[in-house]
Image (spheres, rainbow, N blue to C red):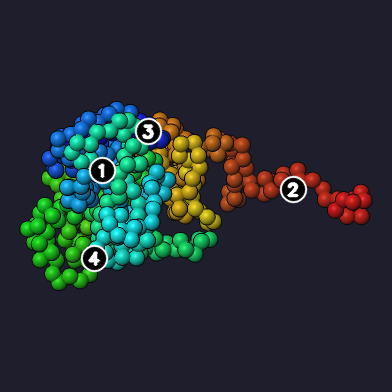
Amino acid sequence: MKAFWVKTGRRITPFDDAPTDAWFGLTTVGAAVRDVLTRRGFEIVELDDDASIPAQDAPAVVLGEHVYVSNKCLGDFLALALGSEDPLRLWLCRTPATDYARPCATHDVAALDESGRGAKPAGAKDKEADATERVGYDVFYLPPGEALDGPVLASLRERAGPQVVKKRELSPEFRMPILGDPDQTKMIFPVTSTVAAHVEHWVHILWLNQLALGVMWMDIVRAHKVWTAWRVVRAFPLVGGRLTRSLVRRGKGVRIHPTAHVEASILGDGVVIGPRATVQNSIVADGAEVGDHAAVLGSTIGPGAFVAPKSYVVWSTIYPESVSYNLKLQMSVLGRRATCSPWSGLIDAKFQGHIQVVKDGQRMSTERSFLGSCIGHEAYVGAKVLIHPGREVPNQTQIVMRPDELVETIPADLPARVPVVRDQGTLVPLTDLVARAKAAAPTPVPAAAQPPGKT
């Protein structure tokens, strides 16, 4: 069977990367999807969207290059679709798992049918049982003898019938800081191995990596049942986090300091975790290093990346060979060989409403009050630089502090035990600066002396 991988020409800003080059877990989105297709025996054929697909003797799969689909999701879709005489499209019930990476993407959302392939799956449970809508993805089943003329994806969106795939998910809630919107005080963080997503913006890279741990863990459990069972047995009695501490998948040559705390994480080859460091619910790729007393929570750290000592990285994605000296990197994306210095700040919350980002030249809502920013490849964010939520810094940009914020000269005759402040590159007594400010202030005009009509 053939899998037709359709190029869309989309680029992910600020990286100027194709969606297939987006980082995902231990690899890229393209490599992960290619692995799924190869494992299922497909011959991959890449083609442009305006090309034609001739009739095939066997069933085929068609998907856009901007799509990520997990092995479990694709397998279940094919199991339901095989034998159909009509083209079919992958749909999932709208639940927290589908909503997690849905904002800012070109998904179709429709009401669930009463019956048939577009209806809620039989035996749906939990969040799926309560769903009233379904979300469509650019993953299609093409029956034998079916030919297509370009544009391929638009044609299939119009012609393909729905096929809703059943999924199971856990939906634990996390408490968030209370801001202006009381509905944003809790965040649902879904865990499922049935994942599909459109990767069209840097926020999708961030959100997809937050879903990656669940996908990868389920793949590990299915492929290594004996290892999983042994780790569970070793964790007995299952109290005090013993199970999550036991479920750590290590590559070759991993070095974890005896005082470090690691749980429920996947570590690649040659990973180094320093003294008193904490790694929880995270993916740390080959050759990455987490410095002493650093904390990495719910994040993806790319190959060769470095999290500096005493840094805090939470729900973020760091591309290969990047350096995070930032004291707190939260809900942000750091591009390849990029650096965030100490004292730089990526503000990650908005007190009123949802954070907006720019996509295809238009501002749109992320439907979230908590989101950081994206730093492009080989960019540098210096000390005392603050960036508003939802921003993207272009590749190779260097942002530094203002020169007038520096103390260039220190007078030798500074008075002892007297507070001094920076003023035009030097230091002066605070009382002198206050006196000058008062002298420069305009003299208030008495109300009786003001012209009529002026107050």
Q: CA distance from mark 4 to mark 2?
A: 75 Å
Counting from the top left corner in percent of width and height, residue 167 is at 25, 58
Element marked by disc 3: loop
Foreground disc of the pair 4, 2: 4
Residue at image location 31% in from the left, 65% down from the top: 129
Element marked by disc 2: helix
Residue at image location 51% in from the left, 61% down from the top: 181
Q: Let me know if residue 393 appears in the view.
A: yes
Which image quadrant: the N terminus?
top left
Q: CA distance from mark 3 to mark 4?
A: 40 Å
Residue 238's tag is none
Q: Quadrant of residue 318?
A: top left
Q: CA distance from mark 1 to mark 3?
A: 28 Å
Q: Amino acid at mark 4?
A: Gly
Mark 4 or 2 closer to N-term? Answer: 4
Q: Let me know if residue 294 appears in the view.
A: no
Q: CA distance from mark 2 to mark 3?
A: 54 Å
